[in-house]
Image (cartoon, helix red, strand yellow):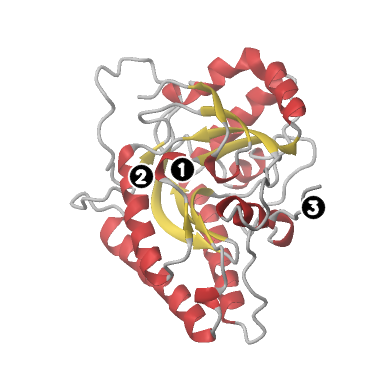
């Protein structure tokens, strides 16, 4: 019989630090939009509040005199080190709608991964081809049969959901490393009037775009996709509803490089330095070779995905049309 393991989500609960209170029974993405009066600058400010507060909390945990240790993912540890438990399988099946990063965002993520690897060579890095942003998690940690039934119930709505970003275009900007005791990610903010930096859509781009401009934020996109799943008769059971738009960059597999206060300070100070570099050199910089803007749906539409999705696995049910 295999080990009974605890997911890192249980030990490392992701809280909403924006201050927005969700209303029971309604689309959970509505609350933030309404609190912001539909104004993109206010939406961006609440996303920024969440990630700044969370990074501050996590920095304090790394530097605390009573530091409790990293939260090492026992599933990933066994998958990467098969000798720990030969024959181990991850049986946590999920269904999600992923956004896939365009090439210029993958190039930015790779450059940041190199900088992080220089700080701590033993960290586990998400392979570029597996990178994604979770636009909506429909359900998680179910059996294969349960997810198959969920997929079939949702099937009539899948083509429209997958290509929804082709005509509903939201923009993410201001990338920054967000981190905690279990993982680190590249997080973005919904755009609010920043200069356009992305490459032009592949010609011809003649589709009638129904929603675009910063008034249609990434949070609006998430709201609309949630609504479509609900309209298809599915109960959305996400682990968390927080104002975050992030790509996981990697996780920790050992305490080796975070064992001493000096090592932990080197890590958090190094992240602060990378974030300062991103803000100074990449944000809003039309001259930068690395581009920090992401038009969600560029190159690829939403990836409707099922299977063992942690760490970028699973399989595609349908990949929507990109622009």
Compared to 266, does 151 lie above or below? Answer: above
Given contact means CB atoms under 8 Å apart, are the residues at marks 2 and 1 in contact? yes
Local crowd size for mark 2, using a 10 Å CA cut-off: few (<14), some (14–19), many (≥20): some
Q: Tell me the CA gap for discs 3 and 2.
A: 35 Å
Q: Residue furthest left?
A: 287
Could you say where residue 197 lies in the image, as x and y percent from the top left?
Answer: 27, 43
Q: Which numbered mark, 3 or 1, is in the foreground of this view?
A: 3
**Residue in the picture at 56% in, 81% down:** 63
Under circle 3, the secondary element is loop
Under circle 1, the secondary element is loop
Could you say where residue 14 lies in the image, as x and y percent from the top left?
Answer: 66, 56
Of the numbered discs 3 and 2, the one sitting upstream in the chain is 3
Which image quarter: residue 145? top right
Which image quarter: residue 65? bottom right
Q: Which quadrant of the rendered structure holds the C terminus?
A: top left
**Residue in the picture at 29% in, 64% down:** 280
The residue under label 3 is 4
Compared to 79, does 150 lie above or below? Answer: above
Local crowd size for mark 3, using a 10 Å CA cut-off: few (<14), some (14–19), many (≥20): few
The residue under label 2 is 106
Could you say where residue 193 lies in the image, as x and y percent from the top left?
Answer: 36, 45
Given contact means CB atoms under 8 Å apart, are the residues at marks 3 and 2 in contact? no
Q: Tell me the CA gap for discs 3 and 1.
A: 27 Å
Which image quarter: residue 235? top right
Given contact means CB atoms under 8 Å apart, are the residues at marks 3 and 1 in contact? no
Could you say where residue 110 lies in the image, as x and y percent from the top left?
Answer: 35, 52
The residue under label 1 is 131
Q: Which mark is residue 300?
A: none
**Residue in the picture at 37% in, 41% down:** 294
Left or right, 235 with reference to 210 = right
């Amino acid at each position: 019989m295999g080990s009974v393991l605890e997911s890192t989500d249980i030990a490392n609960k992701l809280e909403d630090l924006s201050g927005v209170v969700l209303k029971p029974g309604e689309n959970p993405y509505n609350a933030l939009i309404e609190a912001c009066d539909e104004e993109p600058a206010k939406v961006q400010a609440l996303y920024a509040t969440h990630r700044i507060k969370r990074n501050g909390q996590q920095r304090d945990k790394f530097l605390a005199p009573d530091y409790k240790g990293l939260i090492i993912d026992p599933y990933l540890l066994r998958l990467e080190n098969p000798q720990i438990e030969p024959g181990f399988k991850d049986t946590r099946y999920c269904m999600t709608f992923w956004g896939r990063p365009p090439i210029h965002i993958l190039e930015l993520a790779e450059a940041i991964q190199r900088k992080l690897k220089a700080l701590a060579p033993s960290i586990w890095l998400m392979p570029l081809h597996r990178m994604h942003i979770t636009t909506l998690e429909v359900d998680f940690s179910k059996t294969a049969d349960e997810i198959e039934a969920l997929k079939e119930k949702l099937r009539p709505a899948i083509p429209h959901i997958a290509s929804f970003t082709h005509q509903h275009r939201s923009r993410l900007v201001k990338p920054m490393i967000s981190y905690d005791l279990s993982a680190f990610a590249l997080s973005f903010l919904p755009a609010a009037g920043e200069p356009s930096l992305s490459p032009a859509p592949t010609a011809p781009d003649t589709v009638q775009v129904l929603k675009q401009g910063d008034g249609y934020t990434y949070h609006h996109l998430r709201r609309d996709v949630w609504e479509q799943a609900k309209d298809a008769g599915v109960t959305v059971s996400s682990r968390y509803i927080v104002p975050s738009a992030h790509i996981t960059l990697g996780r920790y597999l050992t305490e080796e490089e975070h064992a001493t206060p000096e090592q932990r300070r080197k890590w958090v100070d190094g992240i602060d330095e990378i974030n300062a570099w991103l803000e100074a050199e990449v944000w809003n910089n039309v001259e930068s070779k690395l581009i920090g803007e992401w038009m969600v749906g560029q190159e690829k539409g939403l990836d409707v995905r099922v299977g063992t999705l942690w760490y970028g696995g699973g399989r595609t049910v349908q990949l929507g049309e990109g622009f």
